[in-house]
Image: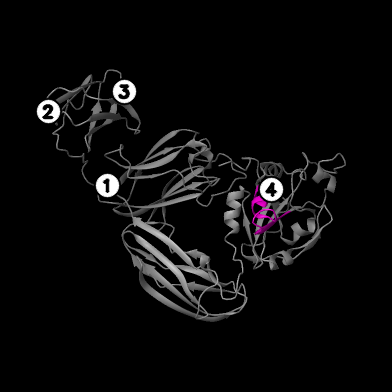
Amino acid sequence: MKKYAVFALGLVFVSALSAQLPSGAQAPDFTATDLNGQTWNLYDLLASDKIVVLEVSATWCPPCWAYHNSGAMQDLYAAHGPQGDNRLQVLFVEGDPNTNVDCLHGLPGCNGYSPGSYVQGVTYPIFDNSAIADSFQITYFPSVLIICPNKKVYEVNPVGPEALWEAAQQCPVAAGSNNAGIFQYDPGTSLHEICGTANLAPSFNLVNLGDIHLLSATIELQWENSTVQILEWYGNLPQYGEAPITLDNWPVSGSGTLKAQITSVNNGGDDDYSNNVKINHFSLAPEFNSQQVILKIRTDNYALETYWELRDDAGNVLDHGGNENVGPNGGNVIFDLTPGVGTYPNNALIKDTLTLPAAGCYSLHFVDAYGDGMCCNFGNGYYKLYNIDNPVIPIMTGDEFGAYDNRGFGSQSVTAVQETTDKSGLEMYPNPASDQLFLQWDMPESVPVQGVVYNALGQSIFNFYPEKTGSEHHSAILSLQNWPPGMYWLHLQIGKENVVRKFTVQR
């Protein structure tokens, strides 16, 4: 994915005396003339069922210029504006009252500062109108707002065209006569791995998208294709009217699929079923065999974007790491992103031992500030969790996850260190070892064998393929003379078996 932002530039604040309109507030109407002399009215655009993406910037603002040069807005407009599928309209507003039109063109007559032309190569309307910025209570540049046809406004971060379009599609758009949809859906948990029992209480806004009043709707909740609740809703919603819906608490354990759907509208069918169904897939949470878990992190080229938290079942933070300037809610925060406390180096391997206070259910929460995860276009980053006695085979992994990755897992009571058992009767001696490590096992000669040794960080440091002996008795000798003292894990793959043994090198 192309990075559409410039990092560590900082937000440019307009005023500390006011605050931007809250998310979900009604957008103020405006009528304004663009640089080409065409007059636009916001509410007229919304009445034509257009989604409006409004960027408010200032010509002298370095992040604004960087975002302009990314081409994100132009790419969005080309794909979904009048020359694309015609589902939205992009509007650009220069919101500083102290600059003139020459600043937008990057001309010498600019009475402030402009690094270049904001007009060249742009086909969407541009306005030099600070009154629009004031009406939306803009407090910093650039600000990007999505205004839905129901006149509600939502602020989003200045991101790429794909992310902008994904956000814009959350807008309800009217179509047909009998039409209702599910919006702002919450299944009742951010975790999709079930540890123990999860009590789900799905909630959403029922929105009327038809041109006649919505008087009734039937809503059904299913678990694994079996109906667990049918809710009959009655009311009187005009077009774009909303009603909050909360379904019954439904306890689930283990894997399965949860489906919430509108099955009838005004005692009949729906003219558009595309927004009638929400589906969530849940799996059984992995379980670790002790109250200590090894966390390994490989950062990408932008390690300052990474932050994580370990939480207990009540949501209390037990441990954390990474850039505290990102924090737990930092997904898609791309401005003023500076290295804070805990920031990791780029392309580094970090190993941490997480100590859990008791057996039970926990969750790991990873945040990527830009919203493109830790892999794979800007480095091959990842995180992996291992049992304390086997840092070779991970129990849980994550890398490509967008802005957030929330994972549930369980922990058993503390147990003795366990190594895998096998049918080969593998013998390994001496342990601890100093110069050599001897291996012996029995297995038919036709069975392929591969050995890998990992250090305490889980890094593969040695690979070997034992020679065939012409019998069922096999052996191998590992020379340890140049190996640093410490703990190591031998992973021997014998046919379809994976045998793990721990050993120590001492001097």
Estimate how packed mark 3 is, as few (under 14), some (14 to 19) or many (20 or more) residues with alpha carbons within 10 Å: few
Residue 501, horizontal then vertical, whole percent: 22, 34
Which tag, 4 or 1, sits closer to the chain's start?
4
- Three-letter amino acid code at the position of disc 1: Ser
Magenta segment boundaries in residue numbering: 73-91
Q: Which mark is residue 290?
A: 1
Kindly identify which residue carries mark 4. 74
Relative to 225, residue 53 above or below: above
Q: Position of residue 433 (x, y in %)?
A: 21, 24
- Answer yes or no: is residue 313 visible: no
Tell me how far mark 4 sits from mark 1, CA to CA.
53 Å
Q: Which residue is mark 2?
A: 472
Cα distance in 3D space between marks 3 and 4: 56 Å
Quadrant showing the C terminus: top left
CA gap, disc 2 and disc 3: 33 Å
Which of the 4 image quadrants contains residue 473?
A: top left
Give the amino acid type for the residue marked by disc 2 in the picture: Glu
For the residue pair 132 and 497, the one nearer the viewer reads as: 497
Q: Give yes or no for residue 212 being in the magenta stretch.
A: no
Camera-side mark, 3 or 4? 4
In terms of image quadrants, where is residue 40? bottom right
Q: Is residue 32 visible?
A: yes
| Residue under the image location 42 percent in, 73 percent down | 220
Q: Nearer the viewer, mark 2 or mark 3?
A: 2
Amino acid under label 3?
Answer: Pro
The picture places residue 186, in percent across and down from the top left corner, at 47, 64
In the image, which is nearer the foreground, mark 4 or mark 1? 4
Front: mark 2 or 1: 2
Are the residues tagged 2 and 3 within 8 Å (C-beta)? no
Task: Answer with mark 2 or mark 1, whichever residue precedes in sequence.
Answer: 1
Marks 1 and 3 sit apart, C-alpha to C-alpha, by 28 Å
Label 3 element class: loop
